[in-house]
Image (cartoon, helix red, strand yellow):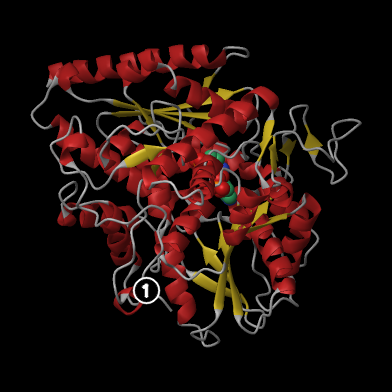
Amino acid sequence: MSTVATPVGLAKPAEKAAPEEIQNTTHTPSQRYLSTRGGSYGLSFEEVVLKGLAPDGGLFIPEEIPTLPQEWESKWQNLSFSELAFEILSLYISSSEIPSPDLKDIIDRSYSTFRAPETTPLVTLNEKDNLYLLELFHGPTFAFKDVALQTLGNLFEYFLVRRNKGKTGTDRHHLSVVGATSGDTGSAAIYGLRGKKDVSVFILFPKGRVSPIQEAQMTTVLDPNVHCLAVEGFFDDCQDTVKALFADPEINEKLNLGAVNSINWARILAQITYYFHSYFALKKSPTYKADHKVRFVVPTGNFGDILAGYFAKRMGLPVEKLVIATNENDILDRFWKTGHYEKKAVHGVAAEGGITADGAKAHEDGVRETLSPAMDIMVSSNFERLLWFLAYEYASAAGMDDEWNKKQGGQEVESWLKELKSKGGFSVNAETLKLAKKDFESERVSDSQTVETIKQFYSSSSPKGGYILDPHSAIGVAASLRSISRNSTADTHHISLSTAHPAKFANAVDLALKEEQGYTFESVLPKEFIGLESRERKLINVPQGAGWEGVRKIVQEEVEAELKAASASQDEH
Ligand SMILES: Cc1ncc(COP(=O)(O)O)c(C=O)c1O
Ligand SMILES: N[C@@H](CCOP(=O)(O)O)C(=O)O
């Protein structure tokens, strides 16, 4: 097996970026970041992390995907999760930007909050089929988002402490983080940022459309720097509002907006580690042989989790395929089947009563309410990053120079997204779709299949009888079973990502298991959730029709009040 990746762009060692391109920083940049819409702003890793979104509305991508060091497999195979994270992050972040001991400390502190000694354990679901489950929910909020958001919280803090050294009052850089959540990002971001100095955090969630435990996790955090906003509508409305705020230069400049969603490059970067970590864990399984293939199956909504797998693959991790598992909000599955990325499903939207043939509630704009609400997402924000790589690769075939290819990539993405906005969809050509199929496959899993899968793996006839999958993880497992049925299980191993603890989704789990002997939901409940729903809460209800300007007003007023209170308490001391 080759130990060197074939990167997009020509790989350069991390430290060699041109210092003259960097503004506002005294630290040597790790490398150049491009915007998916074509812009290139010469920003350092620190600035990319603090800004979140590029000024042209695009998402930041590293210009080069680093190659793996020689002998990476033998050198890395016995590293702990934190040690491995350090090796991987160091390939992207130069030690002159974050000195190695500091980066190590950020990483160690981020994973010291996890309950599992392996951080993200790999469990065998069915040895006969070589099916494994990567449990990503052992962090503070019981969802995979903790892996990246603990790190991001500590990175924000590190950069702010460094920027604010010796500064007082209004000279201090105050970051106003705004994020959209369908349930999990919100609590993970809040737990990563609560109580941190010089940061306010605003989380927008769709009112009544996150699970009761998720809402309690977010709203029972009473720290003065945490603000939860309940918005009428769906996750996509919250995500659009966040993007509109970022697009407003006035508020952006005044409040220094920061992003916690996976639009923030650091989110993707931190998630790369568990693809490598689980690969090494798999290699230690008795059935794994050197020439075996590995497939990762990922329950997908905003395309952040699976995009980290794509980066791992491009760096050189031997992944045969990345399998996208969607719920009935299947825009990605439809794209991989047809090459059309269209907001509204062409089929299956209910004619009557808003109920689809699969039994889910459908809405006029095409979003369905499913049993896996964290994935009830219409437009996947990180798909834009993959689109850039596809457009770049397609352009590269024309034989022009690399700068031209990159520009071309950005222009193509810009025009696709314009069409998405104006016409509700766009199509790619057959060659581009072929490029997408080279690395990915996709599966759509209905609510009824989700319930069946939860039942199947709980049943005593399952090799891991009594195991309770959360509905999102069950979507991954259902998709894995389909992939297994198409591939020889003798030499293909499936790692299915388990993205949340079942206790977060009582509704779906109860629906699947209520008739099963010996099952009670209470037995699933971690001690951290007991009594959570009856604790004191703090919540701002955004008035209906307030729009993004209404949210802007709330954010502005809350930040002002927070800063005033902080300065008053400073005066007192
Ligand atoms: C539990 C759970 N599973 C899966 C997903 C999908 O992950 P991604 O948005 O990174 O595709 C999410 C959130 O989006 C989630 O909260
Ligand atoms: N499922 C997510 C939606 C936001 O996704 P993100 O990864 O872009 O933050 C959630 O739980 O909030």
- Residue 460 in the image: above or below residue 174: below
Point 39% across, 61% down: residue: 273
Query: Position of 426 compared to 135: left or right?
Result: right
Q: Tell me, yes or no, if residue 290 can be seen here.
A: yes
Please provide percent x and percent y for residue 213. Answer: 58, 42
> Which of the 4 quarters of the picture holds residue 509?
bottom right
Tell whether circle 1 marks a residue whose Cβ is less than 8 angstroms from ligand 1.
no
> Which of the 4 quarters of the picture holds residue 265?
top left
Q: Amino acid at mark 1?
A: Thr
Point 29% across, 74% down: residue: 70
Point 38% across, 68% down: residue: 117
Q: Secondary structure at mark 1?
A: loop
Q: Nearer the viewer, residue 73 or 82?
A: 73
Q: Which residue is mark 1?
A: 3
- Residue 305 in the image: above or below residue 407: below
Please provide percent x and percent y for residue 59. Answer: 44, 36
Q: Residue pushed farthest front?
A: 399
